[in-house]
Amino acid sequence: PDLVIKKILRSSLSDLICKGVKPKYYFISASGNSKSFSDKNLKKISNSLSIEQKRFDIELSGGDTVYSNTNSFTCCVVGFSNKIVKRHNSIMGDDIYITGHLGDSFIGLQILKKKILIPKLLKKYFISKFYMPSINLKMVDFLQKFANTSIDISDGLLVDLNKMIKQQKHGFLIKLDKIQISNRLKNFLTRNKRFKIENTIFNGDDYEIIFTSHKKNRSLISRYSKNNNLKIQRIGRI
């Protein structure tokens, strides 16, 4: 439960951060029974929330609990911004960027489903990427400065990219060889030929960010991301 609650909270935070909104308050509701909400599990959940609150500078502001034999959590996050980066606001010729690395979370899910057997250290890494996606508060200011449009990657790179621009009837070109993956995923794919890179990085649950920006911003984005230790990749264009 300590990892599940982190996944739920981080995926909710991602919805705001990817729009240039700084999260501040969150509300969480849960359903379960005495077994799922044992003292041990409640302590794990409480400790996880405490860690996440400090990491992301957010406050628990309310919620509810309901008795049920079905376990569930619902999370709502509230934040503030002077400028919200909207969907459907790309410009023809915009560069397409992504943050971080894609595909690690997908491998983590396959491990949890017992479809892959790998060494313990690698197993721990990929599972942590599934439960604890990399959410970076620095992206709030970055997106406000440079992004024309943006969305987080929950359903998969191509699916979410389509959602981001579909109302504009724009197309896009993605250069697969421009998409850098983590060294651990690279090593995994080298040793497991049945997994192809295109089948690994397009499956979602990454909670990285796709955004577009005018090509005149290329050098500014490169310099800003380097100075602020942000992993940004240019992978195509509108």
Image (cartoon, helix red, strand yellow):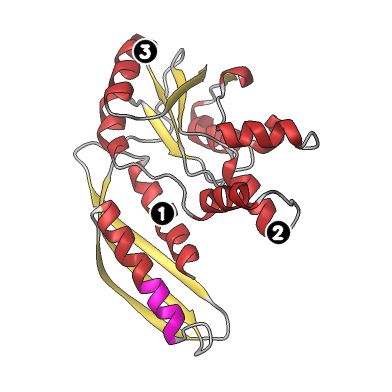
Q: Which residues are magenta?
A: 39-46
Cβ atoms at labels 3 and 1 below 8 Å apart: no
Question: Which residue, as the protein is rendered here, is positioned at the far right?
Answer: 194
- Looking at the rendered structure, the secondary structure element under dot 3 is helix
Please state the horizontal and vertical placement of residue 94, each as a whole percent of the image: 43, 16
Magenta segment, prevailing SS (helix, strand or loop): helix
Q: Tell me if residue 120 can be seen.
A: yes
Query: Would you name the residue on which mark 2 appears?
Result: 113
Query: Would you name the residue on which mark 1 appears?
Result: 10
Query: Would you name the residue on which mark 3 appears?
Result: 218
Q: Nearer the viewer, residue 22 or 125?
A: 125
Residue at the spot 55% in from the left edge and 48% down from the top edge: 125
Sequence-wise, the earlier of marks 2 and 3 is 2
Q: Is residue 25 left or right of residue 98?
A: left
Could you classify mark 1 by the number of other residues whose Cα lies within 10 Å: few (under 14), some (14-19), or many (20 or more)? many
Work out whether 158 lies above or below 43: above
C-alpha separation, residue under disc 2 versus residue under disc 3: 40 Å
Q: Nearer the viewer, residue 121 or 171?
A: 121
Could you classify mark 2 by the number of other residues whose Cα lies within 10 Å: few (under 14), some (14-19), or many (20 or more)? few
